[in-house]
Each structure stands twice: as structure tokens, then as C-alpha cells.
Amino acid sequence: MSTQNLQVKPKTSLDKIKVPRDFGRLKSTELLVRDRAKDARDVPLVPSLSSNQQRSGIHTRSTGHRHLPCRRPFVPVVDGSQKPLMPTRASRASSWIRNRKATPFWKNGVFCVRLNREPSGRNLQPIVVGIDPGSKREAFTAKSRAHTYLNVLTEAVGWVKKAIEQRKNARSFRRQRNCPCRPNRSNRKKGGIPPSTRARWGAKLRIIDWLLKMLPVSGFVVEDIKAKTTGRRKWDASFSPLEVGKQWFYSELGKRGTLGLKQGYETKELRDLLGLKKSQSKLADRFACHNIDSWVLANDAVGGHSKPENVALVKLIPLQFHRRQLHVFTPSANGMRKAYGGTRSLGLKRGSLIKYQKKVCHVGGTRRGKISLHDQKSFKRITQNAQKTDLKFLSYCSWRYQVR
């Protein structure tokens, strides 16, 4: 056979492809790297990927990390003892992974790398987290003088007050029914922060602790909010739940770094000084809705920019667990109430990320020895009949996350 009839596919070298400096490798280079003999396996946490990107793993002990599935220009870095270092660019993190200098992993939708050797330097720059609290949405921005590393948008915890009321009514109804006597509990805590307020501010603190595991944060700037006064001096000073909750939150932040406070009108003045406009769509998932205020607060503390250079968002949605509910509130036709509540489904913690039929799902409830699974993106139920043996555990998780 003549060699002229053979079509030889030319090789494409990585040197000929222009790689964006800020956003890692182009998709056009993925196939070349993906054709390597060894693929990544044993993933503790896999993000939501498109159908052509789903794969067996990202976190790998072997060589050959195919590409960086990262849409942000910077990647958090930790050393071998999980101590956070200064973030690096996505292109450099990709090079570290290819050369086995670092191992990739995920923390609630944020792609990170862990160094496999001692870092060449441990010099740290001041990184400040700006916090914009709200009743429905809350924003966090981690920024240094040189770069904006991470923007986080979260939904506030707003269901606790209603759950406490339902618990109170359920206990009252059980006392009136013909069921075994339950003596009063003498170990109930009296006073302190109300449950709904504690849940709201506790969720903010958990996000701060999550950021501290990835970034060397040195300080915080919070937009101070005040409760509506009633005219009663004693109530206004001490007994407002909002005031009590935020003072507890401020005291906890002070243990983790320096704390600065800004009033709402001061945030607006800083925003107007830079010529930035805030969106009026309070429930939209855009940078201009809430994160613009958190960015302004952080930028005022460290300086360095006149406008945001990184507007990518990571949205966190807290999962609601019915921890101690005994049964459904509405009985069935025969008067029986189905069991409901708890945080375990056949030994798996509810909310955990698992892999089921090449899909990443959240663990839901259980019924008749089967497990209910929910989609990671939309949280819509996928199935109610999953076998435990068909599931591969990836990671514990108490949030849904979306990268925008």
C-alpha cells in the first residue's frame, strides 16, 4: 500500500497552544493530556461537571493530572500539614500537579492543591475577608492588596424559628395523646442566644472557619447592622436577639484575627467613591448584588484596586436536616405516623456526597432498605431505590455549592 494514501494525524505540542495566564489550560489541550496511560482515581470530593467531563477522579496518588477544572484565576495552597499558604495561579498549580509537586483536592466547590514537599518560602501577605450580612443573602470576599482570591455568596439560614414552633406543637400534642409518659428534661439550657439567631450567626462562623482552612486570613471587616429599636432602653441595649447574636459573632471573629466594623452608610460612600453601582435585585446570584459590598469592605482595608478584577462566585446553600423529629406530622389513613428525621441513612450521613452511576449526588432519606439520592446541582430527587452497595462515598458535606 502506498504511503501517500495514509493520513497521518499531526501531533500537537503544548508549546504551540496559547494558554491564558489567568485561567489555566484551554479545553483544546484536555484531550492530549487525557490520553495519558494513568488516570486519576480515589476522589474524596468531585465537583459538578458536564457530561463530557465526568471522570473517575481528580484527587490522585498517581501521575497524570489531566487538566485544572477551575474557573477562578487563583488556587488555594496548603502544605503537608494542611496549613494554608498564599494562593497561586491556576497555570502554576497545573504544572505542580503534572510534576507531582502537589495533590489536588476540593473543599465545597473550591479547587485546592496540597504541596507534596516543603515550600520554597512561607512569606504571607495580609488577606482580609469582607463580610456583608443580610436577611436572605450574605456575601464574603477574601482579598489582598494585589488580588481578589475568592467571592462567596450564601443563603441565610431562615427555617429554624418555624422548626422550633413545630417542635413545640408536636411535643404538646404527644402529651395529649395516649402514649407513654415522657418526664420533663432537666438538662434544657435556659437563656443564652435564641436558636434562630444562633443558627444564623453560627452559619457565618462556619464559613469563616472554612475560609481559614484554605487561605491565611489575617483580618475581617464586617458591615455593622443594627436592630430596630423599640424605645425601651434596657431592651434596645441588651435583649434584642440581633444585637446579642452579632456581639457573639464579633467576639468569635476577634479570636480568629483583627476585626473592623463599618456602618451601612460608610459602605455606600466607599462604593460611590469608586463609581461602583449595586444591583437592586437582592435575590439574584450576581456579584453586583451583595459581593460588591463585601469586596468594597475588603478593598478599603488592604487597598490596591479601583474596581473588582475577579467577579467569579461560589454559591453555598446550607442543607436543612431534621435531626430529632420522630415522625411525620400528618398521620396516614390508619392513624399511623411514618418515621421521619435523623441524620443517618443506612449508616451514611445525610447530605454526604456520593457517586452513583457516574453521577455526583447527595444522600437523602431511607425507606424499606433503600436510599434516596438528590442531584448535586438542583437537589432534585434522582431515585428512592438506590442500594447502599452501589454507592461510592466521596465526602461529608453540609452545603450545596454552585460555581458561577
Image: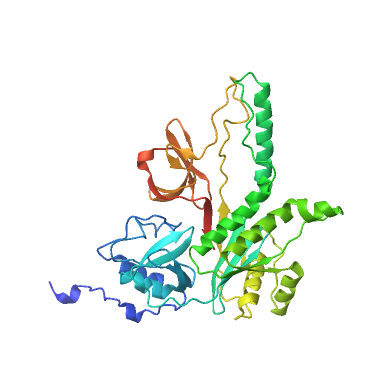
| Residue at image point 15% right, 75% down | 3
Which x, y percent locates residue 47?
44, 57
Q: Kindly indicate the quadrant of the structure image that contains residue 32.
A: bottom left
Nearer the observer, 191 or 202: 191
Q: Residue at x 39, y 57 (%)?
A: 54
Residue at (57, 22) in percent of width and height: 336
Q: Position of residue 49 (x, y in %)?
A: 44, 58
Give the residue furthest to the right: 231
**218 relative position to 84: left or right:** right
Q: Going by the image, does 184 lie left or right of 265?
A: left
Taking the view exactly as shown, the residue that stands out farthest to the left is 1
Question: In front: 179, or 281?
Answer: 179
Is there any visible trace of residue 135 in the rendered image?
A: no
Which quadrant holds the N terminus? Answer: bottom left
x, y (%) of residue 261?
69, 68
Q: In this view, does 268 lie above or below 232?
A: below
Task: Decide if residue 216 is on the left or right side of residue 332.
Answer: left
Q: How many labels does the image show?
A: 0
The location of residue 211, given as percent across then percent down, is 53, 63
Q: Which of 33 and 130 is in front in this view?
A: 130
Q: In which quarter of the image is residue 78?
A: bottom left
Q: Which residue is drawn at 36% across and 42% down?
A: 390
Which quarter of the rendering shows the C terminus? Answer: bottom right
Above or below 8: residue 140: above
Q: Is 148 situated left or right of 106 in this image? A: right
As drawn, 62 above or below 178: below
Instruction: Describe the colour scheme in one phrase.
Output: rainbow
Q: Do we see residue 130 in this rendering?
A: yes
